[in-house]
Amino acid sequence: DTGVSQNPRHKITKRGQNVTFRCDPISEHNRLYWYRQTLGQGPEFLTYFQNEAQLEKSRLLSDRFSAERPKGSFSTLEIQRTEQGDSAMYLCASTRFLGVQETQYFGPGTRLLVL
Amino acid sequence: AQSVAQPEDQVNVAEGNPLTVKCTYSVSGNPYLFWYVQYPNRGLQFLLKYITGDNLVKGSYGFEAEFNKSQTSFHLKKPSALVSDSALYFCAVRDLRANNAGNMLTFGGGTRLMVKP
């Protein structure tokens, strides 16, 4: 396995701009998760996909946040009209769904700074 | 609702000494418990998990964790710490209730482990 990859690794943007992050999961992993980690805190669940279906999105922080996984492979997380409070590390994890036995493997994250 | 507490922001230990990083949890159903480690500017790296069976779980890099149901704890341990173990450690829990959003993990706030030579 080559591991979960995320791009970009760092993003600096001005308040009000839109940003998009990409996550490439481990090959053949059918579940993909997005988490947010703010400074000094543990990761916080945002949303997840099984194949191309987004099965949970109620934890997305606001309607400015959206995610897609159009072909069941890579996923994108978009934040529209960014605010300074969006500054955080955005983590992606993937797993091959085995029911409760699954282990989530995380990517290196994208660190967002909103000026 | 599920929750995890890591009561220590930082643990300091001398190289070669045993280390313990504490974790307590709260869930409605049976818990699945995980430990992850995060090095600077890196993502979370899986260390070990408790699913069922033996209460003592062995993981990567010589780490182990002990599940204690009566104390709702899952403390991370290592018999002999290395300077390279210095990192941020996160405990996480998965609630086995059917309505747990796709097996989402709930993380503690993290504990910084500092191992000094």
Image: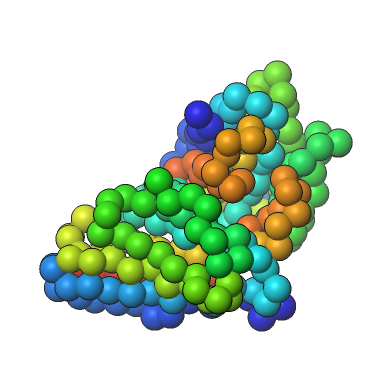
Q: Is residue A26 left or right of residue B63?
A: left
Percent from the top left, x then y, of residue B75? 65, 37
Q: Which of B79 and A80 is in front in this view?
A: A80
Residue B43, compared with residue B28, is above or below; it is below
Left or right: B53, with A71 as reference point = right
* Residue at image coords 41%, 65%: A67
User: Whole-percent x and y of residue A68?
Assistant: 44, 68
- Give the total number of marks visible in the rendering: 0
Picture residue at 71% right of the left edge, 53% below the top: A102
Q: How is the image coloured?
A: rainbow
Residue A111 image offset from top left, x and y in percent: 35, 69
| For residue A77, side relative to residue B72 (left or right) | left
Residue at the location (46% across, 63% down)?
A: A91
Q: Quadrant of residue B9?
A: top left
Residue B51 visible = yes
Question: Residue A11: image x %, image y %?
Answer: 30, 76
For the question of whether residue B20 can be seen, the reply is no
Vertical relation: A68 (above or below) A55: below
User: Which quadrant of the rendered structure holds the C terminus of chain B?
Assistant: bottom right
- A61 or B80: nearer the viewer: A61
| Residue drawn at (71%, 78%) of the image | A1
